[in-house]
């Protein structure tokens, strides 16, 4: 519109005249510039509108966005763009954008299980399947278990020990979006001493040789080398089998199986390559030697003692207590249901019942806990049963939820990415009907799952 047009003198007209005079005093180009600015502003607005239209707006009846604070807000909108949270706003914000209606539900960040074995579930056929199943068979089995894990609300897992190629292929397939599953950090084959709990047992010698994995070491130099090789093959983190294990088919007990020099070499090599180290350890000697060597966390921790608690605190290491595995093993041992070999049954009768007490002592002693189930012992998709066990061990429901969100994120080095719903973080969230801060078992009944902004149907086994 020409500001100098004739017509009644109004305030708006005067303003336009004044504005035009200021802009155009002696410069013909200014008007062209003005037009260009207006066009750019319009284009920016159009682009913003288009982007807003692609946003996903999650309407949460109740929202625990930051488990660290524990604050629950009512009627919130989580604004999601390109798989990430861009804002959390008060009220149910209307579009543009696709609305996900969770107004009747309680929403919290996606859950994290820091200890699973995605391509396997324990069965009495384990021993024979070690011979008959190929890595490809394992990967295919993992497709189903990964989907079950995601449906159960676990949007991130650490897979600690599985055949390298099967596990890395599954991890990468999920990351590409080829199949549904949680975000996976994978150790691949665990590092174990020759003859130790991570070696192959219970077969005639020729079969044992054929089944042995490439991750056995003896002596500090060899252990250092095997860690480097494992990182080269694709490991996101390093798992070391520092002590005997319940399920290995041996009568070796559950004590330390590596020397301090071997443990130190493993930790040094892994850290030099930017990888965390987590140690499978049941006996106190193995827990304490691993912590003294500088591992970042302990899996199981069954027989930890006072020295262990002091070391955990001093090193700020995390404990992943895997109470669900302990409870499951104890149940199998008592039932004598054919799931355990005679040697394993003896160990399970000792380890299973000790775990709850261990977690109680660790928590009371101020040890930082990250959530892990060892799923494959208990069935995939039942991971959330760990929460009630943590509460039995003395954690409040909020503390138990923290182990699977904010603590787990820090433990896995993913604090910038997951563990809370805040701008910049992955849009990973779950929803349940009741309040999990009243009854943590609500998390065993997941109604809705979103990972990276993509919705999945929720449900537990
Ligand atoms: Zn395990």
Image (cartoon, grey):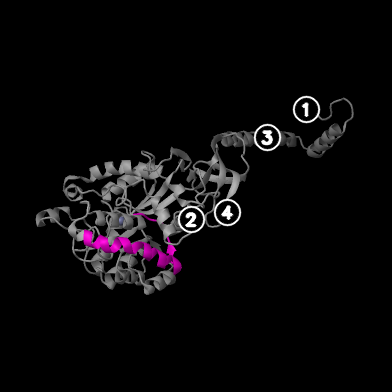
Quadrant holding the N terminus: top right
Residue at 27% in and 69% down? 262
Task: Please report contact status of discs 1 and 3: CB closer than 8 Å, yes or no.
Answer: no
- Number of residue marks: 4
Q: Position of residue 406 (x, y in %)?
A: 48, 56
Horizontally, residue 420 falls left or right of residue 39, namely left
Q: Secondary structure at mark 4?
A: loop
Tell me if residue 303 comes above or below residue 239 in the rendering.
below
Task: Please report contact status of discs 1 and 4: CB closer than 8 Å, yes or no.
Answer: no
Which residue is identified by label 1?
A: 1
Which residue is identified by label 3?
A: 36
Mark 2 to mark 1: distance in Å? 65 Å
Q: Nearer the viewer, mark 2 or mark 1?
A: 2
Q: Name the residue furthest top.
A: 7
Q: Residues within 10 Å of mark 2 (few under 14, many from 20)?
A: many
Q: Nearer the viewer, mark 2 or mark 4?
A: 2
Horizontally, residue 22 falls left or right of residue 460, namely right
State the residue in front, 113 or 262: 113
Horizontally, residue 249 falls left or right of residue 14, namely left
Task: Please report contact status of discs 4 and 3: CB closer than 8 Å, yes or no.
Answer: no
């Amino acid at each position: 519109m020409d500001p100098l047009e004739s017509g009644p003198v109004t305030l708006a007209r005067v303003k336009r005249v004044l504005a035009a005079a200021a802009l155009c005093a002696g410069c013909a180009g200014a008007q062209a510039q003005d037009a260009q600015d207006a066009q750019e502003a319009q284009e920016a607005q159009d682009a913003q509108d288009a982007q807003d239209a692609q946003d996903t707006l999650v309407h949460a009846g109740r929202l625990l966005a930051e488990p660290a604070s524990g604050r629950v807000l009512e009627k919130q909108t989580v604004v999601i763009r390109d798989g990430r949270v861009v804002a959390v706003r008060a009220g149910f914000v209307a579009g543009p954008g696709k609305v996900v209606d969770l107004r009747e539900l309680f929403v919290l960040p996606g859950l994290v299980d820091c200890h699973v074995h995605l391509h396997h579930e324990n069965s009495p056929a384990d021993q024979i399947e070690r011979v008959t199943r190929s890595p490809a068979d394992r990967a295919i089995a993992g497709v189903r278990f990964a989907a079950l894990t995601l449906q159960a609300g676990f949007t991130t897992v650490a897979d600690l020990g599985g055949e390298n190629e099967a596990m890395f292929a599954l991890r990468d397939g999920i990351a590409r979006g080829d199949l549904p599953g949680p975000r996976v950090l994978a150790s691949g084959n665990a590092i174990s001493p020759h003859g130790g709990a991570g070696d192959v047992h219970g077969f005639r010698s020729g079969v044992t040789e054929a089944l042995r994995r490439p991750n056995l070491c003896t002596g500090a130099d060899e252990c250092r080398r095997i860690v480097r090789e494992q990182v080269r093959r694709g490991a996101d983190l390093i798992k070391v089998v520092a002590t005997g294990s319940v399920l290995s088919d041996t009568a070796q007990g559950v004590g330390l199986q590596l020397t301090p020099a071997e443990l130190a070499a493993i930790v040094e090599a892994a850290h030099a390559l930017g990888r965390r180290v987590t140690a499978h350890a049941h006996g106190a000697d193995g827990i304490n030697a691993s912590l003294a060597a500088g591992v970042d966390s302990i899996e199981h921790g069954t027989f930890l003692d006072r020295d262990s608690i002091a070391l955990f605190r001093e090193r700020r290491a995390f404990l992943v207590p895997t109470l669900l595995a302990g409870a499951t093993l104890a149940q199998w041992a008592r039932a004598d249901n054919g799931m355990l070999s005679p040697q394993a049954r003896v160990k399970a009768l000792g380890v299973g019942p000790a775990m709850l007490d261990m977690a109680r002592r660790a928590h009371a002693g101020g040890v930082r806990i990250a959530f892990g189930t060892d799923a494959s012992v208990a069935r995939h998709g039942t991971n959330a049963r760990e929460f009630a066990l943590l509460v039995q061990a003395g954690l409040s429901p909020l503390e138990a939820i923290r182990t699977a969100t904010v603590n787990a994120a820090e433990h896995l080095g993913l604090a910038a990415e997951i563990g809370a719903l805040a701008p910049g973080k992955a849009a990973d969230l779950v929803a349940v009907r009741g309040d999990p801060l009243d009854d943590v078992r609500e998390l065993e009944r997941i109604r809705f799952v979103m990972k990276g902004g993509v919705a999945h149907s929720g449900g537990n086994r």
